[in-house]
Image: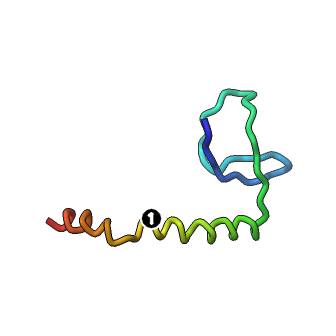
């Protein structure tokens, strides 16, 4: 299983910002990002997401919803 969740560090412990259903003792891989690096990746992915979600081909779905 591969998933990404946001977390914060409090008193030296990593706490997910959402519920994560993992057995006690599970091993996880943590990638540390500074606020600057996080912002870079958000901005870098925005162009790709905009291209996927905002394209003329999807207008047919908007028209179907209007009917």
Q: Is residue 63 left or right of residue 5?
A: left
Give the labeled residue for mark 1.
52
Q: Is residue 54 left or right of residue 46?
A: left
Q: Pinpoint residue 2: horizontal percent, then vertical percent.
A: 62, 40
Using the rendered view, name the quadrant where residue 43 is placed: bottom right
Q: Is residue 65 left or right of residue 27?
A: left
Q: Is residue 44 left or right of residue 10?
A: left
Q: Pinpoint residue 27: horizontal percent, then vertical percent.
A: 75, 32
Q: How is the image coloured?
A: rainbow
Using the rendered view, name the quadrant where residue 34 is placed: bottom right
Q: Pinpoint residue 11: horizontal percent, then vertical percent.
A: 84, 50
Pick out the residue farthest to the left. Answer: 67
The one nearer the camera, 19 or 49, is 49
Q: Quadrant of the C terminus?
A: bottom left
Up/down of 57 relative to 15, above or below:
below
Q: Quadrant of the N terminus?
A: top right
Pick out the residue farthest to the right. Answer: 12
Q: Residue at x 75, y 66 (%)?
A: 37
Up/down of 45 relative to 1, above or below:
below
Up/down of 20 relative to 6, above or below:
above
SS for dot 1: helix
């Amino acid at each position: 299983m591969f998933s990404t969740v946001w977390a914060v560090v409090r008193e030296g412990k990593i706490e997910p910002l959402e519920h994560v259903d993992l057995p006690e003792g599970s091993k996880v891989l943590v990638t540390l990002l500074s606020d600057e690096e996080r912002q870079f990746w958000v901005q870098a992915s925005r162009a790709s997401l905009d291209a996927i979600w905002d394209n003329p081909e999807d207008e047919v779905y908007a028209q179907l919803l209007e009917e």
